[in-house]
Image: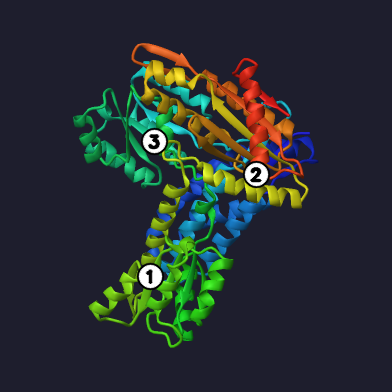
Amino acid sequence: MSGVVDPLINKTITGNPPVLEEQAARYARDLDYKCDRLLALWQETKPLFVKKGATKPAFLRALQGLHKSTQLYGYAALHQCLDSLLDQVMKTTSENASLHQYRIEHLLRRIKLLADGQTIHSSGMEAESHVLMLPPLYLLSNNEIFNDQFLRELDIFGITVRKFSELDQLIEALTEGIPGILIVALELMDEQRVQSLTEVIQHQIPLVFLAEEDSWQARIRSVRLGAEGFISTQDPADRVLDYLKVQRDIDSELTPTVMLVDDSPSFASYGAQVLEASGVDVFPVMDPLKVIPLLQEQDFDLLLLDLHMPECAGNELAAVIRQYPKYQQLPIVYLSTETGLQRQLEALSVGGDDFLVKPISEAHLVSAVHQRIERFRSLKKLINLDDLTGLVNQINIKLSLETQIKQCLADERPLCLALLDIDHFKEINDGYGHLMGDVVIQALGHLLKFQVPADCLPGRYGGEEFAIIAPNTELEEAHALVEALRVRFEKIEFSCGSKRLHVTFSGGVVQCQPSMNVDQLIQSADECMYKAKASGRNKTLSE
């Protein structure tokens, strides 16, 4: 029986009469548009909200309607998030509006992410139909040859493209819903036309300019017109996926966590109240001796430390924290009444990253904390991700695999691992150059990023080899996923001057057995993959 699936709660709504199932399928198809509409209405109501703590009726009606309908159709995770948003909006006053704004926009981003993650299943769809439903790409260009090729190539990655030849048509479409990315031909734009676009999209999505050639003149003109990205008609189509802001990493979904260490109960309570209203989970600690044990139990994005405390000074505590290699990158910000510049510099020299002086305004505290957390999370991504593909690197594949093995075996749930290796990769490097080799690796990385289900973890294992960790997945289903990826990948046409080539990969898929550890599971998948290569390449084997 067909049904609507919420992949974030792994729930299928079945058993309804046929009419209700049709309604549910229609609702699922419209859900992304409804959430885009809510975001657009927020931009309209935001000035009134920030100034008076009030909202326009259209925004409130849309929010209440979406809140009710997601409950009706069984989207539990999305409904819960909308419930929090509605509560936040209703309890806002003119006095606390600026603080609630942070929390509301955090929830709106989360709602958009959840909506993008909804999919529709039916018995007649392909095996790969359970991947993320990606937002469409809008293209304004009169180059029909480029447009047709561009659409064909992006379709392989699961990206839907709507093309427009007139700016008025594009703006009309944008008023109905916001895409994931907007690409406009540079030759069709000037300052006035760009302003018309930005008034509609409100910087919610990347604006990428398209030029016939990659030149300094074209790039500088695009920057002056406010571009967030630039491509030429000669670039591989999948390069635009770098600009597609689909958040797949867990860190972006987690609520920021801050430890506030201060021996003053009144300030600890005040600081926690202010930051929690902005969407941060705060752990107030008044005894500095409890900091290390708490750090070992809980992950934090930031530490706020008072400098003057009776048991242990803040700079002494920071020095102790930095003795642990695990906490070398953790941001530490002093929050103190200390105004002496020399004393502040001494404190910063032993492990602190910033210094905020009490008393501090609510807006300043919230802004400083959110900016520091954002930088910390960006740094973590650079450390944890492969720089060529943006996927997790080998070390984090192994760490995640170790965690998943323990969890899945403890809960008696299936776990599969797939290893993929690009066929004849040395010949690609030798025949077309290492830059072409990088293009091929990036293309497979993009395919995995956008076509692997959200509850699985794709990564670059090393060189031309990739891995997919698939928890809660039976062997047959994991095999079908890799096979669907293989078929998509071999359709991609790579260009090198006048030469054209298609590339394939071989894949091995295994299911974790109770007796296996991380190394044994990886070795088993590796052996399966090489059997696929030995038996002719461009195939998927599982065992």
Q: Residues within 10 Å of mark 2 (few under 14, many from 20)?
A: some
Residue ID for mark 2: 518
Task: State the mark number for residue 182.
Answer: 3
Question: Measured from the top left, where is residue 147 in percent x and y?
Answer: 40, 21
Residue 159 in sight here: no
Q: CA distance from mark 2 to mark 3?
A: 42 Å
Position of residue 376 relative to residue 36, above or below, is below
Quadrant showing the N terminus: top right
Q: Nearer the viewer, residue 453 or 183?
A: 453
Judge depth for marks 3 and 1 and give the one in front. 1
Please tell me which residue is depicted at 40% across the width and 82% down the height of the picture.
313
Judge depth for marks 2 and 3 and give the one in front. 2
Residues under numbered marks 3 and 1 in contact, where contact means CB atoms less than 8 Å apart: no
- Amino acid, disc 1: Val
Residue 39 in sight here: yes
Residue ID for mark 1: 333
Q: Residues within 10 Å of mark 3 (few under 14, many from 20)?
A: many
Question: Measured from the top left, where is residue 172 in percent x and y?
Answer: 40, 35
Q: CA distance from mark 3 to mark 1?
A: 38 Å
Position of residue 108 relative to residue 164, above or below, is below
- Amino acid, disc 3: Leu
Q: Nearer the viewer, residue 358 or 27?
A: 358
Looking at the image, residue 130 sits to the left or right of residue 96; the answer is right
Residues under numbered marks 2 and 3 in contact, where contact means CB atoms less than 8 Å apart: no
Q: Nearer the viewer, residue 359 or 46?
A: 359
